[in-house]
Amino acid sequence: MATIFFAEPELVIGHGRKVLFLNPGDLQIFKEIELPPDLTTCGLKTVEPVPAPGHPASSSKQQPAALKEATGSVKVEVSIQNVTYSPDRQLLALTTAGQKAVLLYKSRPENAQLLSIRPLARASSALRFCSDGSSVLVTDKTGDCYQYDCVEVDASPRLLLGHLSIVYDVLWSEDQQYIITCDRDDKIRVTNYPATFDIHSYCLGHKEFVSGLAMLTEQHIISASGDKTLRVWNYTCGKELLLHELPAPAVRMLVRQLEPEKTYEVAVLFYDYVDAIGVYRLEQTTTESWSITSTQLVRAEAGTWNICNFALTDDRIYVTGAENERLTLRVYDSRNGERASGLPEGWLKMVLDNLDVAAFMPEDLSVWFKKRFDNVSEYLERKKRRIEEQKQQKCG
C-alpha cells in the first residue's frame, strides 16, 4: 500500500519500509524514516503461544501460520499501511502489515525519534489522533477499534468498540466526547467516549460502503460512499442535511477548509471512472443548510495507470498509483486538472530511488462492494415449473 498526505508544510509519502518527507514546492526530500526488515530488532515484543491444559506443546511445523508469524519462525515482509500526524505535529504514528505493529515517533525537524512499538492484533484500516495528541485510535479489518496511549507509550491498548465489518475511517470529536466510525455495511456510528458501550446515534442512508469521513464543524461531518453520494450530517442527532450525487463510487475523500470561514474544498477519488478525481466547493449557508457551489473534475490520465491514493494542497494534487506494476507519482494543477508545470527535473526518479520500489500492485477495491445474490428469482421459477407440472399431471 502507498500512503500519501499533506500536513502543512510537508508532503508525506509512505511505502514499503520507508516514510519520506518532502517539500511540496520543489519536491526535495528533507527527512525520512526507514523501518528494519525485522521489527523485533527495534523492540516489537512477541508472545509465545501457551498450549491448552493437558495438550502437548506443538512443534513449529504444527503451529498455525498466525502463530508462526507472531513467534518469528516465519519471515514476513514489513510494509507500512497507515501514517498520520498528531494535530500539533509533535507526534507521528504509523502502522505496518506483515509484522503487524503501531509505531509512535517524536517528530523533529531533522529526524524522528522512535518512542514505542506495540503489536497489533490484526491488520489496520485507519488511524486517528485525538485533539490533544494524548492517544491514537487504530481500527482494523475485522471492525475493532483500539486506543493506544501516547503518554504512557508502553501501555497496552484498550479495545473501545467493534463493528461487524471492516472500518474504513474514524474521527474523534474536538471535545473527545464522540468517536465516529464508518464501515463496509453502509453505517456511520457515533459512539460516546469514554463510555464506548453506549452508542449515541447512527447516520443512516448510504446504500454502499462508507469510504471516508471528515469533520466540518462541532456538529457536522461529511461522508463519501460507494453509492455515488456525498452527504453532510448533523452527527449529534443523525440527521442528513445534504445529499450530492457523484458520477461514480467514492473510494477516498479529503477535505480542506478555505477562506472565508464555513467554506470547504472536498476532493474525492472515484472508482473506475473516466475522471479520476472530483473537487467540490462546499459552503454552509445556515446552521443546518449546506450546498455544493462548484465542481472541478480532474482526469489525472485515468485509464492509463492504476490510481490508488492522492494528497491535496493549495494548488496541486499529488497522485500515487501503479504503472506497469511499478509505483509512480504524478502531480496535477487542482485549478484546471492539467499536469503541473515548473516541477524540478528528475524529482520522480529521486523519490522512487529513495523508496527502493519493487513490483507494486494497489489494493483491489472491487472487494469493497458487497456481493449480492438473487436466489428468490430462481426459487420462483422452480415453483412456477412445479405448479405447471402438477397441472399437467391432473389434466393427464
Image (cartoon, rainbow, N blue to C red):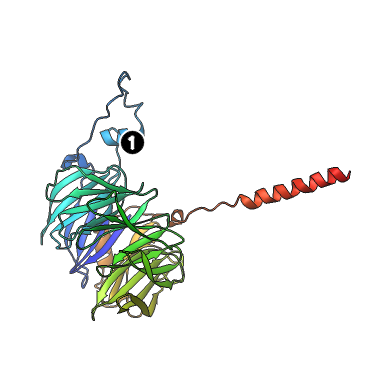
- The amino acid sitting under disc 1 is Ala
Q: Quadrant of residue 157?
A: top left
- Depth check: give the residue in front, 339 or 166: 166
Left or right of residue 102, residue 243 in this image: right
Q: Quadrant of residue 337?
A: bottom left
Can residue 355 be seen from the camera position used here? no
Residue designated by label 1: 66
> Residue 114, position in %: x, y?
13, 50
Q: Is 301 rendered above or below residue 120?
A: below
At x 75%, y 45%, the residue is: 386
Location of residue 18 in the rendering, given as x and y in whole percent from the top left corner: 23, 54
Please give the name of the residue rendered at 15% of the width and 46% of the height, measured from the top-left corner: 116
Quadrant showing the N terminus: bottom left
Left or right of residue 91, residue 73 in this image = right
Q: Position of residue 181 (x, y in %)?
A: 32, 56
Q: Is residue 172 above or below residue 74?
A: below
- Secondary structure under tag 1 reads helix
Task: Estimate how packed mark 1 is, as few (under 14), some (14 to 19) or many (20 or more) residues with alpha carbons within 10 Å.
Answer: few
Quadrant showing the C terminus: top right
> Residue placed at 29% from the left, 24% from the top?
51
